[in-house]
Amino acid sequence: MKKSVKTLVFLTTTVLFFNGIHAQLKLPAVNGIENDFKKIVADYPNHFSNLLGELLEENAQSVDYSCNCRITGAEETIITRHSSKGNNVYSWQSVMLTTESFEKAKQKFRSLYNQLNHLSVNPAGKSYQLKANYEVPLEEKKFTSILFSLDPDEETISKLKAELSLQFHEPMEWKVKILVYDREREDNERGKTIE
């Protein structure tokens, strides 16, 4: 009888001990950008019209607007309407970090890549997954860009591009940005020729 009570007390103490350790090891949930970014991509087919805020700046070929949906941790978010030859093309960008430290920028770049790569997004009511290979930023290169593709790759959504960039700006700033935009044609594709 004494042996079974000791065993029961030992098991109870062990369970409580490990539950206490498990509770202490839990890290606080980090708010990622995933849900905010899904909202941005979902409104891409509408030219971000549901996210369009107040007019910020008007130029000859573009107009900048504030964005009503901010990405968690973003410093600045802008929607731009580009006008050329009667067509309006829209882009969205969010500055996620501005720093003098290349190492901090590189860490933020990697963190954002990890959050975006394999993220499921739903433009046009269908589920796609963002995919890209990681490119290690180099300080002497001054610019690194990762262009995410959508899987499955379909013609109906082929112009949608999501990009993560790390770029040096004078005098001593590194900026990490996320962009969503229309891409008229691939880099190796020729434009229309006029004879």
Image (cartoon, rainbow, N blue to C red):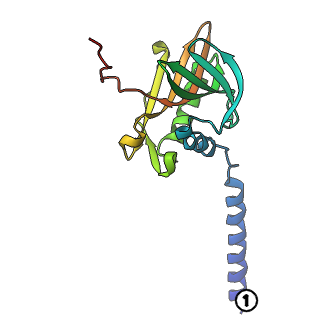
Q: What residue appears at the point 67 percent right and 44 percent down from the top-left corner?
A: 31
Give neighbour class at mark 1: few <14, some 14-19, many 20+ (Cα, 10 Å). few
Residue 114 at x, y percent in the picture: 52, 40
Front residue of this view, candidates 15 and 127: 127
Question: Quadrant location of residue 10?
Answer: bottom right
Residue 39 at x, y percent in the picture: 61, 43
Q: Which residue is outermost to the bottom?
A: 1
Residue 80 at x, y percent in the picture: 59, 24
Label 1 sits on a secondary structure element that is helix
> Which quadrant is the N terminus positioned in?
bottom right
Q: Which residue is outermost to the left?
A: 195
Amino acid bearing label 1: Lys
Residue 37 in the figure: left or right of residue 55:
left
> Which quadrant is the C terminus positioned in?
top left
Front residue of this view, candidates 187 and 100: 187
Q: What residue appears at the point 51 percent right and 26 percent down from the top-left corner?
A: 89
The residue that mark 1 highlights is: 2
Q: Is residue 159 above or below residue 154?
A: above
Q: What residue appears at the point 50 percent right and 47 percent down from the top-left corner?
A: 124
Q: Is residue 97 above or below residue 128?
A: above
Residue 33 at x, y percent in the picture: 62, 41
